[in-house]
Structures are given as structure tokens and as C-alpha cells.
């Protein structure tokens, strides 16, 4: 056999359309008669709507209709929250598609205009007169819980959206009289996901059939259809949702938003195709944000650096309403990961979900796990400083030893497999850790400030078993299905319910099938994104697509192989048990020239002229795969920074990482995921942050103020890997889409704090702007 | 992100542009568009009439004569950055141009459009002030010497987003004196990470004879509403040997020169921080001009 | 408001249209000509998803009026491959080096890179990074984009 296709860094099969401008994203679709919707958004973060006068807008050139909350009220149901975490008193407050009485954040919709062209729609927006009575505003999640704070929803006293506690061991006892305790208040600033493609929707309505078609920039078209059915009241089977090419999501395209529901509403009212595409400034106020925690954290340890307990009280901003998956993120995906890769016996996470007058918060790359990892890695560095130990040494003393088939942690999860020490050793060897420390000492003697940051992490992804989904209040399943279908010509389609949007699964999925059945990757096409021609699936997020859809594909391929073997035996007039398979061929044991290729078998199965008794025609298999466990990738990262003490400017000099996602189907794609993830996490550490003023106005409302990582600001990422297969997945694979983001923020943060050690600086708020660093150095 | 409607005229000559300007009181001139179009898209500017002067070839290009480099108002930042003439005779102008925006912005944005917009975050205003550049302006009336006037850079920039240019005037060119053999200039800035706009910038021009500074021009930008000379820094330099110590001592005076003349807080940098950075940037620009450092 | 007639050559084809004065070039290309390979990512000329070539220069078409380019020659991503369909070396290099993920920034990134290599046929990695400072990619961390541009430079025979 030649090089195995599984494990080959072949170039991506989706790229030709993307590099030639031929790919079709939602806003690229132009249907005859399409009209354009634009949404009038609240300019106040909190206000009572006294009146909305749409008369001038309705009379403006090209305008077909103007609708307000009075029109949608009772027609569109409220936008549901789909992750109601149990035992946490979740307040599923009403989330109307268009606000009728009160607006609760800058960006809340008050009306929609539909016009013949986009420019006319925008002109008409300015003619809508809204009379507001401003109400008091609160944007800080902790402040919002205090007595006397402005109240967003009558049915959520103290703005409490939920209160969730998880614990393992006896965390209170661990803090009774610990040998050492370190404390910090960590601010996980609010972030704006910023996929390069803004969100868009296009809706058509076929009244004679009662059918709605909705093109949407979605990471999960099947969930979008499900929720669209709930909101519009249309039967699910009469709705078709298509996520065409989607230009990145990073969690912000998971939620089902009011705006595509409003787009559908307009299409149904007007009988014309209606398109809505947001501008970037609209994206920044109206598409979900991420993070936004205020965390009070304590870590207890022994004098020799063994961690004995971690506990936190977290105020997690939810924004003005509960977005689709919002409550699950700071709880299940955050609080349950407080052990990280460490043996920590006593843990407690107490999380308050809090309504604030700001854009709703949702998943953002890593979703909960970056916050958990940051919390641990930050506290461990504080502990190292307290004990005057090398941060690496503290990690070594606490890492869980190597395990291959399950390890229970105090918070009740069972990790699948891990070799954390190896990852750490590998990255330290690679960077030459001791030499870096010597270099640091040499530079410090010359008043030059270099810092080295190290993180070890373990994360939970490949979400997840559906039974667990149900137990933790997720409003759906988390299994995936895959259909593999061979045609008479020997070519095959794979149909999946997940919806890749940049992660390259049109290639990796073809590699899986190719590896299983010896068919050339170019003879396989992966179909996804359209609810009418793909089987049910729960979507692409939580680094689950390759793990769960991939497993479903492998199992479908194996079913096909079984059938093909039986059919080949029949055609070769041999007993099935005498048939062997290798490299796309079924042959009689000992007689390799007596063989049938998978293509031969596919032809016969499709024409069905000569089938074994009782065998159905066709060569196709469907698998519904529900994973027995999450997957837990892990790794160790190192960052080297320099700080200009005169200005506070940070230069990211070097970044090296070891990530372990088990066997890699396509190493080139894996590396690409790590590069992008690391840089996104660097964005949180160094540049990004949604900043609001006291009136709830977003001050970072465009790319002119919200600074994103750019090519010249980041170094080359040195990527390495170890390979520890997951025992809980047929392919042994683990997710890799979020690891970079999860690990890099604390790694870079720790490096900066390390650089500032000579100045006695122990804490800073992110992003680490030059001003913040300079003020810390100069104690201003 | 969608401009309001406007009447559009294309001028193919300076004559025509002046004529159109005189006939349309509310008109805005459009050069490369990189200042005006963003404002129009945000609906912060909604001119009734736009006069597109971008096609006037006479206003493009760089010529050198009599100790002066003449840069046509419609010359792009990119063309200036790449100009061998500018590099040889006044490298600092090429360096400043190369740091504006990004390559695509530099391909369209023009020096004239930039200075007429007079954004405090622009690089040209402090650099041109430090270089004692002259601004050649065409007034109303017939094309010809009678209709023109010349302003020093320091006279041209009058305040936040304002210049001495009257509504019916047109900037023709900027003339930058060729640096003498004993002159050195440098520009140091702290760029905003999102836009490359100057958060704090310092442009300097020093003359050195027999090892001592005989004249200095130190101009701050970025943090002030419009470019500002740091006169006490200049005074402290004259007569001194440009050592690291002398430069640092002089640069420290920049904060006092600024006083309260600092633009308001921004998300990225507060006024206090920017004030504190002024001496640092002045020191860096001076060190570079003096050949003591390259950063 | 009266429309203004313009004539431009796009990817070698002469196109005549009457356009609103306020119509942006990017909207003209996408809506009138159906050339949707050029994207809009930021609206404020930061991200570079809309980069096309006007008379050979890479520009941000979201900050340019269609009327401004009357008479110009424009090349978009759709016009980059040869007439026979052979990919431009930069397209090939982006593909070979995994220089894209979601693909949304890719058209602008490639168009910017074409000019970068015209101006500097054999850049260093740092020069590529600086040359692409006007193009934002949220997926790749830029690493494979830089690699792709360097590979294309090599393939195009650039001499340092």
C-alpha cells in the first residue's frame, strides 16, 4: 500500500471554488425579485418605546413595507433559549423578534424596512421616528446583581438569569486552613467574534405549498430549521434551511437570531424573496459576543506546590437576553473544567448568569473552556510566584499521570486519555526552556524585559453524548448522522448533518471514506448545509464535527464494507469468510488475482443484476452516531514576549505549542486550526475587547476601534504534536478547532506578567494594551 | 454604510475644478476618497455636491527643483513612499508615507486629501510642519499665478479637522525643502493597532554643525488636535551636542509644551498616557535623526 | 437622482452601465455585474476582503465610488486565472499551502498578494506580513498565507 490517506496533509478539496471567487455565500445569492430588509436598531441601551412613527419611511422611494414589534407580536413567537441548565433557576425571559415596549441593548430591533434596493432601505431607516424614554443602564455583570441596579426583566430579580453550582470533593474544607492560598479577580473581557463574513439571511415563501426556504449564515442549519419552526409556527418539514458557504462563525453563527426570523416574516408577508445582510457595525452590536466574566477565584495548595482546592464565584454576563446556547457556556463548558489537566481533589464553581444592557453573549471559540483554562493557568502562576517556584515545576507537580482509558476527575467527568507530561516535556525541549530562562536573566541585567509564559491545558470537546446533553438541559441531541452512498460509477457522496464553514471537512471526511474503502478522495464529494438533502445533525461547534460526524462516516463505511464483502464473495463464488479486503479490493484469500474492487461491487449493487439471495440493492449506509463520551484534547504552549518599558508595548516574539488531538486525519488542516486558534487567543490577550461606556454605548463599534490580530503583529507559530488516541471514538480522534484559543490567551498573559516581574507587577487586565502595561510598570 | 444621494461632477482640470467649486457652495472635493467616502458611508458627511478631482493629471507627480521637492496634491501616499526622488532628498517623507494606513489605502489616499481633512491621527501634518513644507493653493478666479497663494505648513493646519483652506480654494501641491547635508529628519509614531493612525507621533528636523545642533524643529502629532511645535524641546537642543543624554533631557520637556493641549481619551489610549508618551516618541525621533538608533 | 453612465473594463470585458452616484464599486461589481467573488467584510476599509485592482493597483473597492473608476481597467478575483482557466500562481500557492479556511478573506488576500509580488518579487516573510497589513484573516493566523505568498514568489521566479 502506498502512503495512507488517513494522516496525509493533502490540499483541500473545497479550495478551488474559494480561490477563484466562485463560492456562494449567502449574500452572493441573487434571486429574481429579491428585495432588501434593513433593521432599525435601538440607539439606547435601555429605554421604553413610547412610539414608533413609520409613516415617512413607508412613503419613501422604493419602500415596500415597514414593520414594527406591533406587527410581529403574536405572529412570531419569542426567540427560545435552547440550553436551560437544570437546577439553576434559569429565567427564560421573553426575547421578542422586534421589541415592542422596551429596548434592552443598543442594537435591539425596533422596526424593519423592506425596499427594492439596499440603499433605499437604509435611507428609509433614517425616516423612522422612535420616541424613547431612556431607562437606567448597567453593563458590568457583577454590578448588575447588586441591590439598586437597573432591572432589565421583571421576571429576573437582580438581573439573575441563573445560578449554578458545581462541586467535587470538599472545596470548603480545602480552604479551611490551607498552607497557601492565592486569590485573584479575573476579568474575562467581552469579545466580538468577528468572522470575516457578516451575518446574512435570504428567505423565500411559496404560499401555495406553505413552504419557507431560508438561506442563513449558520453553523447548524438543522437547529436553525428546528427553531424557525418554533418561532414562525410553520411545520418543520415545510421549512428548508440552507447554510451555503459560510465565512467563519467562531460560535457567533450558532444562535438563531431574531433577524433571520424577521427576514422570513417579511418574505411571508410580501411574497417576495427578502434578503438581509448586516453591515460590520451592525454585526458588532447585533451579533452575539463572547466571554464577559467577572471571576473571583481562590486556589489552595500545600507549601510544596500541590493544589488542594480551587473555587470561584463567577458573574457571567449574558447580555440583554438569553441567546440559543448561552446558559450552557459558563456552566457546563466552563465550571466543569476547573480541574484542567491537574489532579485537583476539591473544586467548586459558582456561576451567576446575569442580564446586562449589552449585546447577548454566546459561544465564542472555545466557549467556556478558554475562561476555565485561563483561570487555572493564571492561578497556578500566582501560586508559583507565591512559592517562588518555577511555574513549570508547579505544573509538573500537579499534572495527572499518563492514562489511556479513562480518568475520573473530581467534578464527575471522565477524561478519555492523556499524556500531559509528555506534551509539556516536548514543548519545553523544543523551545529550550532553560536557555530561554538564562537569556531572560541576561536581558534583565540590561534592563530589557523578556517574559516566558507556559500553559498546560486539557479541554472538553467533541460534544457530546446525547444522554448527557439531555441531563444538562441542552434542548436537543448531540448525535450526528452520515449517509455514505456509492453510485454505479464507483463514485460516492457523503451526506452529513454537520455544517463545516472553514474547517476543511469536505477534505477530511473524504479522507476517512477513502481510508476505509480505498476509493480515491477525488471520487468522493461531501454534501452538507442543506436540510433538504442532508440527514439530521446538530451542527458544527464545540470541536465536534470531525469527532462525531467523522465517526458516523467511518461506521457507515464499515457497514458498506461488510455488504461489499458479501457481494464480492457472491460474485467471486467464494465463501464470505474467505474474502479479504485490502486497499479497495476484495479478494479470495490466497488468490489476489481473484478480486473485485469496491467500484465493481458498487456497479453490481446499483444495477442489482446478480445479488445474493435476500440482499437489498444499492450500496449505501446510514449511521446515527452518538458518542459515548466527550473528547479531551490537551497540550502545552509556550510564549515569549518582550515588553518595551518606556511605552508598555508588547511584542510577541515566539510562540510554540504541542497539541494532542489523537491521530490526525490531515495534519496540514490540524496545523491550520492551531495557527488560527492561537492567533485568536492572542487577540484576547493583547488587542481585543468590547468596550462600553456607562450608557451602554459600544465604543469599539467597528474594526477602526476593535483591534484584531494582523499579519505583521504575530510571529510564526511553531506547531508540534503528540498522539494519544481517544479510546471512546472509532477513529481515536479528538477535536482541534478550539485548542489554540483555549491555551494561547493565558500563555501570552503569563508571559507578559513574567516579563514584568522586575517591576513587581502581578496582575493586569486584558487586553494588555501598552497603556495598561505602562501604567503597571510606572505604578500610575 | 451607505452614503446619501449627491450630485457628482468630475473635473478634468484645475480650471474646471475651480469653476465647479465656485458654482456649488456646499460642494466637497473628492480626491482619493479615503477621508471623505468613509465619512459619507457613516453619514457623518452628506454633501449635496461632490466634485471629483481625482482625474486631474496636473496635480499628480513629484518633481524636484531648486532645493525643493514638489509633490502634487493628488499624489498618492504609495507613490511618495516609493519615489526615489523623495527617498534621496527627504527620506523622512517617504518613511512617513509608507506608514500610512496599509498598501491599498496608500494606493488611493493622496497627500492633498489627507492634509485637507486634517485628521489629528494623520502622519502628514506633523511631518510637513517639521519639514517647513509649503502649501500651494489655488483660489477662486482664473487659473494662473494671480489666483494662487502659498502657506507654510504651520499656517495651513489651524485646528481639529480644520485648515486655512477656504471653501472655494483648492490645494495644488505641497513643497518640501530638500534636506541640506547638515540636516537630519525623522518621524516616530505609536500606531493604533487597528488603523495605523498615529496615537502619538513626533517629527523632527535638526541641523548640525561642528557636532552641535544649530536648529531644531520638533512637532507633535496624533495626540493634539492639530500639529504642535514643542518649542522648549527645540530650544533645549540648540547649541547642544546631540548625545543620548542631551536628547533625553530635551525630549522630557515635550510634556510641558503640551500642557492641556491633548485630545480626549480614546479606548486605546487615554489623554494622560498619550501625554506621557510624547517625550518618548520625541526622544526616539531625535535619536534616529542623530543617528543614535534605528528604532 | 440622475444616474451617470460609466464605462469600465472588468476582467477584459468592456461594461457600460448607468449608476447612482453613490454606488460603491464593490456593490457595482457584486450587484450589477454579479462578480460576487469580491467580498465586503468591514465597510470601513480595514479588512481588505474587497480588494480589486484598478488600473493595476490594489485598492479597497468598498471605499471607492463606481463613478470614480469610469474609464478604468479592473481586475477581480474572477479575472485572475488565465483565459484557459489555469490558476494564477498565487491561487495555486494558496491552495497548496492551506492559505485559506473559510475563504471569505481569500479573494482580497490574493489580490493584495498579487500586487505585493509585483512590487517586491522576492519578499522576506516579514515583508509579506507587512505587505498584508491591510488584509484581515480571522481563520488562519496568517501563517499559511505568508507561506503561500513566499511559495508563489518562488514559483514565479522572483529574484531577491
Image: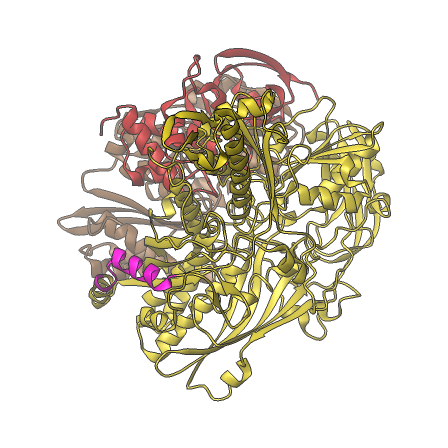
Chain colours: A yellow, B brown, C red
- What is the x, y in percent for residue A138? 67, 64
Q: In the image, is residue A367 part of the stretch drawn in magenta?
A: no
Vertical side of C78 occupied by A12: above or below = below
- What is the x, y in percent for residue A690? 56, 55
- Residue beneath the point at 39% across and 63% down: A456
- What is the x, y in percent for residue C43? 56, 37
Comparing B128 with B134, the one in front is B128
Q: Quadrant of residue A58?
A: top right
Residue B186 appears anywhere in the view: yes
Q: Residue furthest bottom?
A: A177
Viewport quadrant of the N terminus of chain A:
top left
Q: Main secondary structure of the magenta part?
A: helix
Vertical side of B278 occupied by A704: above or below = above
Which residues lie in the magenta part?
A419-435
- What is the x, y in percent for residue C57? 42, 24
Q: Residue furthest left?
A: B210
Comparing B181 with A179, the one in front is A179
Relative to residue B83, is residue A415 drawn left or right?
A: right
Q: In the image, is residue A434 part of the stretch drawn in magenta?
A: yes
Residue B137 appears anywhere in the view: no
Comparing A290 with A390, the one in front is A390
Relative to residue C108, is residue A611 drawn left or right?
A: right
Comparing A335 with A132, the one in front is A335
Amino acid at each position: 500500500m502506498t502512503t495512507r490517506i488517513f494522516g496525509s496533509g493533502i490540499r483541500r478539496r473545497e479550495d478551488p471554488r474559494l480561490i477563484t471567487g466562485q463560492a456562494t455565500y449567502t449574500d452572493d445569492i441573487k434571486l429574481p425579485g429579491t428585495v432588501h430588509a434593513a433593521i432599525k436598531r435601538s440607539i439606547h441601551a435601555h429605554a421604553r418605546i413610547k412610539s414608533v412613527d413609520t409613516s415617512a419611511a413607508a412613503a419613501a422611494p422604493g419602500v415596500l413595507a415597514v414593520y414594527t414589534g406591533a406587527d410581529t407580536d403574536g405572529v412570531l413567537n419569542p426567540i427560545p433559549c435552547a440550553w436551560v441548565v437544570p437546577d439553576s433557576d434559569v429565567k427564560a425571559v421573553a426575547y421578542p423578534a422586534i421589541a415592542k415596549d422596551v429596548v434592552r441593548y443598543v442594537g435591539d430591533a425596533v422596526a424593519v424596512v423592506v425596499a427594492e434596493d439596499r440603499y433605499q432601505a437604509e435611507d428609509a431607516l433614517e425616516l423612522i421616528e422612535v420616541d424613547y424614554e431612556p431607562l437606567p443602564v448597567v453593563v458590568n455583570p457583577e454590578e448588575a446583581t447588586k441591590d439598586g441596579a437597573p432591572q432589565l426583566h421583571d421576571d429576573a430579580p437582580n438581573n439573575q438569569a441563573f445560578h449554578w453550582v458545581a462541586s467535587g470533593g470538599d472545596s470548603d474544607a480545602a480552604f479551611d486552613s490551607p498552607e497557601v492560598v492565592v486569590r485573584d479577580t479575573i476579568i474575562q473581557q467581552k469579545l466580538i467574534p468577528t468572522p470575516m463574513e457578516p451575518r446574512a439571511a435570504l428567505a423565500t415563501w411559496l404560499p401555495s405549498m406553505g413552504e419557507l426556504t431560508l438561506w442563513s449564515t449558520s453553523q447548524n442549519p438543522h437547529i436553525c430549521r428546528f427553531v424557525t419552526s418554533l418561532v414562525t409556527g410553520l411545520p418543520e418539514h415545510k421549512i428548508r434551511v440552507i447554510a451555503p458557504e459560510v465565512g467563519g462563525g467562531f460560535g457567533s453563527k450558532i444562535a438563531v437570531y431574531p433577524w433571520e426570523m424577521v427576514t422570513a416574516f417579511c418574505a411571508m408577508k410580501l411574497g417576495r424573496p427578502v434578503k438581509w445582510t448586516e453591515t460590520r457595525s451592525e454585526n458588532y452590536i447585533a451579533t452575539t459576543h463572547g466571554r464577559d466574566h467577572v471571576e473571583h477565584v481562590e486556589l489552595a495548595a500545600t507549601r510544596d506546590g500541590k493544589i488542594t482546592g480551587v473555587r470561584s464565584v463567577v458573574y457571567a454576563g449574558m447580555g440583554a437576553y438569553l441567546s440559543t446556547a448561552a446558559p450552557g457556556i459558563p456552566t457546563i463548558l466552563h465550571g466543569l473544567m476547573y480541574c484542567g489537566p491537574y489532579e485537583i481533589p476539591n473544586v467548586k464553581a459558582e456561576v451567576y448568569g446575569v442580564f446586562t444592557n449589552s449585546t447577548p453573549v454566546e459561544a465564542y471559540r472555545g466557549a467556556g473552556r478558554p475562561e476555565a483554562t485561563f483561570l487555572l493557568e493564571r492561578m497556578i502562576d500566582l501560586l508559583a510566584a507565591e512559592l517562588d517556584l518555577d511555574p513549570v515545576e508547579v505544573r509538573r507537580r500537579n499534572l495527572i499521570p499518563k492514562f489511556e482509558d479513562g480518568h475520573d476527575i473530581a467534578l464527575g467527568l471522565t477524561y478519555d486519555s492523556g499524556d500531559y507530561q509528555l506534551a509539556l516535556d516536548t514543548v519545553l525541549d523544543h523551545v529550550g526552556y532553560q536557555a530561554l530562562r538564562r537569556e531572560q536573566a541576561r536581558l534583565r541585567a540590561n534592563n530589557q524585559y523578556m517574559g516566558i509564559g507556559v500553559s498546560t491545558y486539557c479541554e472538553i470537546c467533541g460534544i457530546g453524548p446525547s444522554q448527557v446533553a439531555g441531563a444538562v438541559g441542552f434542548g436537543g441531541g448531540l448525535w450526528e448522522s452520515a449517509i455514505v452512498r456509492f453510485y454505479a460509477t464507483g463514485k460516492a457522496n457523503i451526506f452529513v448533518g454537520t455544517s463545516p464553514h472553514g474547517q476543511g471537512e469536505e477534505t477530511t471526511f473524504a479522507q476517512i471514506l477513502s481510508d476505509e474503502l480505498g476509493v480515491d478522495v477525488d471520487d468522493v464529494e461531501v454534501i452538507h448545509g442543506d436540510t433538504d438533502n442532508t440527514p439530521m445533525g446538530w451542527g458544527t461547534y464545540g470541536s465536534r464535527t470531525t469527532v462525531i460526524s467523522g465517526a458516523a462516516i467511518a461506521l457507515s463505511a464499515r457497514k458498506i464494507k461488510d455488504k461489499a464483502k458479501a457481494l464480492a464473495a457472491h460474485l467471486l463464488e467464494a465463501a464470505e469468510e474467505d474474502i479479504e479486503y485490502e486497499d479497495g479490493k476484495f479478494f479470495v484469500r490466497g488468490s489476489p488475482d481473484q478480486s473485485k474492487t469496491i467500484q465493481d461491487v458498487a456497479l453490481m449493487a446499483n444495477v442489482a443484476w446478480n445479488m445474493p439471495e435476500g440482499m437489498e440493492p444499492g450500496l449505501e449506509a446510514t449511521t446515527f452516531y452518538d458518542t459515548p463520551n466527550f473528547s479531551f484534547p490537551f497540550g502545552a504552549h509556550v510564549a515569549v514576549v518582550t515588553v518595551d518599558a518606556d511605552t508598555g508595548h508588547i511584542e510577541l516574539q515566539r510562540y510554540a505549542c504541542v497539541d494532542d488531538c489523537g491521530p490526525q486525519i490531515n495534519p496540514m488542516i490540524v496545523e491550520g486550526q492551531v495557527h488560527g486558534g492561537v492567533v485568536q487567543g492572542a487577540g484576547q490577550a493583547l488587542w481585543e475587547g468590547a468596550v462600553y461606556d456607562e450608557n451602554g454605548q459600544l465604543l469599539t463599534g467597528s474594526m477602526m476601534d476593535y483591534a484584531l490580530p494582523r499579519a505583521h503583529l504575530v510571529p510564526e507559530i511553531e506547531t508540534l504534536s503528540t498522539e494519544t488516541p481517544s479510546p471512546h471514538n472509532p477513529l481515536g480522534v479528538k477535536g482541534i478547532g478550539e485548542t489554540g484559543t483555549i491555551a494561547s490567551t493565558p500563555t501570552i498573559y503569563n508571559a507578559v506578567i513574567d516579563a514584568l516581574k522586575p517591576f513587581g507587577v502581578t496582575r493586569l487586565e486584558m487586553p494588555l494594551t501598552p497603556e495598561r502595561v505602562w501604567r503597571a510598570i510606572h505604578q500610575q | 454604510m451607505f452614503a446619501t444621494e449627491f450630485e457628482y461632477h468630475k473635473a478634468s482640470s484645475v480650471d474646471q475644478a475651480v469653476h465647479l467649486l465656485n458654482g456649488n457652495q456646499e460642494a466637497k472635493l473628492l480626491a482619493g476618497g479615503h477621508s471623505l467616502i468613509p465619512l459619507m458611508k457613516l453619514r457623518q458627511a452628506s454633501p449635496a455636491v461632490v466634485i471629483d478631482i481625482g482625474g486631474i493629471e496636473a496635480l499628480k507627480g513629484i518633481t524636484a527643483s531648486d532645493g525643493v521637492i514638489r509633490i502634487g496634491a493628488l499624489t498618492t501616499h504609495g507613490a511618495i513612499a516609493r519615489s526615489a526622488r523623495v527617498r534621496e532628498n527627504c527620506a523622512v517623507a517617504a518613511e512617513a508615507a509608507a506608514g500610512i494606513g496599509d498598501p491599498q489605502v496608500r494606493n488611493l489616499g493622496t497627500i492633498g486629501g489627507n492634509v485637507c481633512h486634517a485628521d489629528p491621527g494623520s502622519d502628514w501634518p506633523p511631518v510637513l510642519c517639521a519639514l517647513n513644507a509649503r502649501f500651494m493653493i489655488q483660489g477662486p478666479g482664473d487659473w494662473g499665478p494671480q489666483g494662487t497663494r502659498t502657506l507654510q505648513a504651520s499656517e495651513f493646519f489651524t485646528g481639529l479637522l480644520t485648515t486655512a483652506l477656504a471653501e472655494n480654494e483648492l490645494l495644488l501641491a505641497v513643497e518640501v525643502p530638500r534636506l541640506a547635508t547638515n540636516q537630519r529628519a525623522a518621524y516616530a509614531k505609536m500606531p493604533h493597532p487597528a488603523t495605523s493612525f498615529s496615537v502619538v507621533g513626533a517629527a523632527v528636523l535638526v541641523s548640525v554643525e561642528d557636532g552641535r545642533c544649530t536648529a531644531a524643529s520638533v512637532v507633535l502629532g496624533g495626540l493634539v488636535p492639530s500639529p504642535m511645535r514643542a518649542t522648549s524641546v527645540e530650544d533645549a537642543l540648540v547649541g547642544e551636542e546631540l548625545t543620548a543624554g542631551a536628547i533625553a533631557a530635551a525630549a522630557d520637556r515635550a510634556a510641558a509644551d503640551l500642557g492641556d493641549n491633548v485630545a480626549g481619551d480614546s479606548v486605546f489610549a487615554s489623554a494622560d498616557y498619550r501625554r506621557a508618551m510624547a517625550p518618548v516618541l520625541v526622544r526616539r525621533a531625535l535619536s534616529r535623526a542623530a543617528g543614535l538608533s534605528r528604532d | 437622482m440622475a444616474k451617470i453612465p460609466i464605462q469600465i473594463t472588468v476582467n477584459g470585458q468592456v461594461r457600460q452601465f448607468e449608476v447612482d452616484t453613490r454606488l460603491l464599486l464593490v456593490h457595482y461589481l457584486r450587484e450589477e455585474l454579479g462578480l460576487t467573488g469580491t467580498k465586503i467584510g468591514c465597510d470601513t476599509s480595514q479588512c481588505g476582503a474587497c480588494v480589486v485592482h484598478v488600473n493595476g493597483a490594489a485598492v479597497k473597492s468598498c471605499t471607492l465610488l463606481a463613478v470614480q473608476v469610469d474609464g478604468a481597467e479592473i481586475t477581480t478575483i474572477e479575472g485572475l486565472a488565465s483565459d484557459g482557466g489555469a490558476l494564477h500562481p498565487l491561487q495555486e500557492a494558496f491552495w497548496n499551502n492551506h492559505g485559506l479556511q473559510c475563504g471569505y478573506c481569500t479573494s482580497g488576500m490574493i489580490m493584495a498578494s498579487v500586487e505585493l509580488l509585483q512590487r517586491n518579487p522576492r519578499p522576506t516573510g516579514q515583508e509579506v506580513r507587512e505587505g498584508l497589513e491591510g488584509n484581515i484573516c480571522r481563520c488562519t493566523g496568517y501563517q499559511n498565507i505568508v507561506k503561500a505568498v513566499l511559495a508563489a514568489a518562488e514559483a514565479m521566479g522572483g529574484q531577491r
